[in-house]
């Protein structure tokens, strides 16, 4: 799935430890265009944070995977970026995605042994 728009905010980077090792993630707020713009919060994991080099004000198209999971009767959804394109020019793609791997794309999931928020 792809979402296009302008990066309006970059949230503080988060990191921690899980059973799978050290993890880090960065969340971004993208605002779509059109008559009724929507805001979408998506995240990049691990090395993709540095690889994508997303800056506030960038106009981007983000390819994402959607993943939901249940915890204590509530559902939580992640919007994980695996490719970022700027105005149809340079593309930054996860090596694992380009090789056909899916799901976590090599990033440890900190929620495997923790509360999902």
Image (cartoon, rainbow, N blue to C red):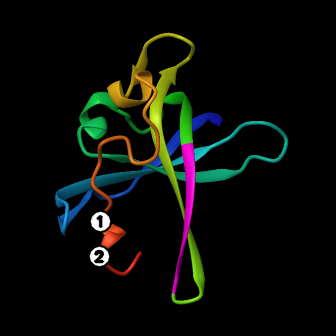
**Range covered by the magenta-colored residues:** 65-71
Instruction: Please tell me whether residue 66 is drawn above or below residue 87 in the rendered image.
Output: below
Q: Could you say which disc has been placed on residue 110 in the image?
A: 1
Q: Is residue 68 left or right of residue 91?
A: right
Closer to the camera: disc 1 or disc 2?
2
Among the 4 quarters of the image, the one containing residue 108: bottom left
Is residue 117 something one can see in this rendering? no
Residue indicated by mark 2? 113
Q: Position of residue 73 (x, y in %)?
A: 59, 88
Among the 4 quarters of the image, the one containing residue 76: bottom right
Element under disc 2? loop
Give the camera-side residue of 35 and 68: 68
Q: Is residue 32 magenta?
A: no
Q: Residues within 10 Å of mark 1 (few under 14, many from 20)?
A: many
Residue at 55% over, 44% down? 65
Residue at 55% over, 56% down? 67
């Amino acid at each position: 799935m792809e979402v296009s728009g302008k990066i309006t905010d970059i949230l503080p980077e988060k990191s921690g430890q899980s059973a799978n090792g050290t993890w880090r993630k960065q969340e971004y707020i993208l605002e779509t265009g059109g008559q009724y713009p929507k805001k979408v919060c998506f995240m990049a994991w691990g090395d993709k944070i540095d690889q994508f080099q997303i800056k506030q004000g960038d106009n981007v198209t983000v390819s994402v995977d959607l993943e939901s999971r249940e915890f204590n009767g509530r559902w939580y959804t992640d919007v994980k970026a695996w490719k970022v394109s700027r105005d149809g020019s340079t593309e930054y793609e996860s090596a694992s995605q380009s090789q056909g791997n899916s799901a976590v794309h090599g990033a440890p999931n900190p929620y495997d042994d923790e509360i999902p928020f």
